[in-house]
Image (cartoon, coloured by chain):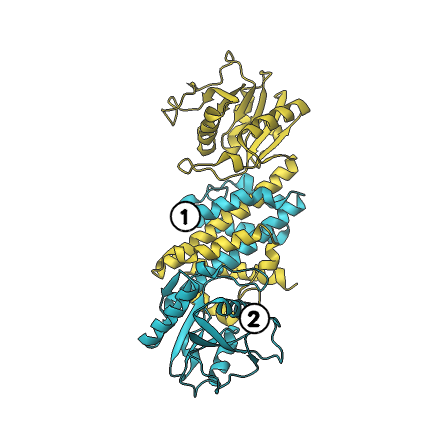
Chain colours: A yellow, B cyan
Amino acid sequence: MMRIALIGTGNLAIHLVHAFETCNATQLVQWIGRKNTPPKQNLNTPYFTQFQQNIDVDLCLIAVTDDAVSSIAEQLINSDVLVAHTAGAVSINELKSIKRKGIFYPLQSFKETIPVDWSTVPICIEATNSEDVELLIKLASQLSENVHQISESQRLQLHTAAVFANNFCNHIISISQNIAAKAALPFSVLHPLIQETFKRSFSNKAFALQTGPAKRNDTLTQQKHLSVLSEEDAELYRILSQSIFNTHNT
Amino acid sequence: MMRIALIGTGNLAIHLVHAFETCNATQLVQWIGRKNTPPKQNLNTPYFTQFQQNIDVDLCLIAVTDDAVSSIAEQLINSDVLVAHTAGAVSINELKSIKRKGIFYPLQSFKETIPVDWSTVPICIEATNSEDVELLIKLASQLSENVHQISESQRLQLHTAAVFANNFCNHIISISQNIAAKAALPFSVLHPLIQETFKRSFSNKAFALQTGPAKRNDTLTQQKHLSVLSEEDAELYRILSQSIFNTHNT
């Protein structure tokens, strides 16, 4: 049984609390947040506002906002326990002079209200010594079938790729939803197209799947599209179209 | 049995030939293209380089590039048959003085080599008289369970929304694939994130799902991401991030 302390009360932290409480191989013995009461009251984990040196743990997991990792790490410097953070774009060196440093980075977008199937979530592992790599892989494998040991540089690139795949695509889908709503059309009309767009990219180079007026420089159709867009959406349309054209015609 | 003439030999046309040949309620009696031989040799439909006035049809379907619709329509002006085109962004008036004009617009991205499940493809219908609306709805319903009668203005907006959902998302996925490849990571690491991104947008407002450094104006993380991007991808990153920030902070 792996004894875990978890620091943080955000979207990811709450999903991790649920995961560790449900998992047979883990025991969450400390949950630590800034507020005096936990954000969820119906959980079984003892909640504190500071890391408890007197409660033994095998791993202290820091699941807080990126810029808070380093100050939290400061408070754990004297501990001999393995300390890992969960951030995609934060260096392992932000854990400062902690002796046993690691990374436990789950690659998914976490929203408190949306359930997560942990078995499919890729968990990316790094640690400064090989025993701790093993320990983190063992833990990650209890939650997920999708565990990867990657370098710091790979993690930053993966996080960047994830911003494109999730943040940017979601923003564009949001614009698409707004256009459909303005046309008094249910967004469900676009579901099959969207489903295919992403399904196909799983087994093909998206570059080879590209179609549409931007790729073939069909300015007449582009003008028609621009005529139905707000100025801000039209600007994005022009820039994305130019980027597609440049990518496919140079 | 609906007798159909199909004009065009592109990706959509080839998928329509397969669909009409397979469907029990349709008979494809003419397939018309510019080239002397059809692009597919193993099909059962008679192929011509011009519309055959002496072969009776109930519907002539024009599935060609947008800017060719009007010149093809010119050649059919003297016919009494219903003529429909398949383009999202071309006005029904491009069918000129044809007496019975219609639209049969399948909302999907068609690639010759990628199979299509027609039963899920939304087919959007328009026609200048109500009997022809009924006829096109009847035909569309033979192929798909997802048939909509929409106006010309709705169709243009839908086509624009589809450019965002498919063309732009695909381009962004392509950049994401390139970043993963450069990091020597399999793109499959990002599949669960992408799957969730789109699945969630089917039952939520994507606006409410937005996360990431752009939304919270986390410039430190953004700088790290920019450091791993090519100049062109970095420019797109900046513009998309600014658009997300503007959308969520005004």
**What chain does mark 1 sit on?**
B
Amino acid type assigned to the residue bearing label 2 in the image:
Gly
Residue A235 seen in render = no
In the image, A60: left or right of A34?
right
Dividing the picture into quadrants, the one containing residue A78 is top right
- Percent of width and height locating residue B3: 44, 77
Do marks 1 and 2 share a subunit? yes
The vertical placement of B121 against A56, above or below, is: below
The vertical placement of B74 against A163, above or below, is: below
The vertical placement of A128 against A108, above or below, is: above
- Percent of width and height locating residue B196: 48, 44
Q: Residue at x 49, y 15 (%)?
A: A52
Amino acid type assigned to the residue bearing label 1 in the image:
Phe
Residue found at the very far top of the displayed protein: A54
**What chain does mark 2 sit on?**
B
Query: Which is more foreground, mark 1 or mark 2?
Result: 2
- Percent of width and height locating residue B124: 40, 66
Sequence order check, earlier mark of 1 and 2:
2
Number of numbered tags placed on the structure image: 2
Residue found at the very far left of the displayed protein: B130
Task: Point out the image quarter for the N terminus of chain B.
Answer: bottom left
Few, some or many residues within 10 Å of mark 1 (<14, 14–19, 20+):
some
Determine whether the residue tagged by mark 1 lies in a helix, strand or loop: helix
Determine whether the residue tagged by mark 2 lies in a helix, strand or loop: loop
Residue B227 seen in render = yes
What is the number of the mark on residue B207?
1
The vertical placement of B245 against A237, above or below, is: above
What is the number of the mark on residue B172?
none
Few, some or many residues within 10 Å of mark 2 (<14, 14–19, 20+):
some
Q: Nearer the viewer, residue A119 or B42?
A: B42
- The alpha-carbon separation of the residues under discs 1 and 2 comes to 36 Å
Q: Which residue matches tag 2?
A: B10
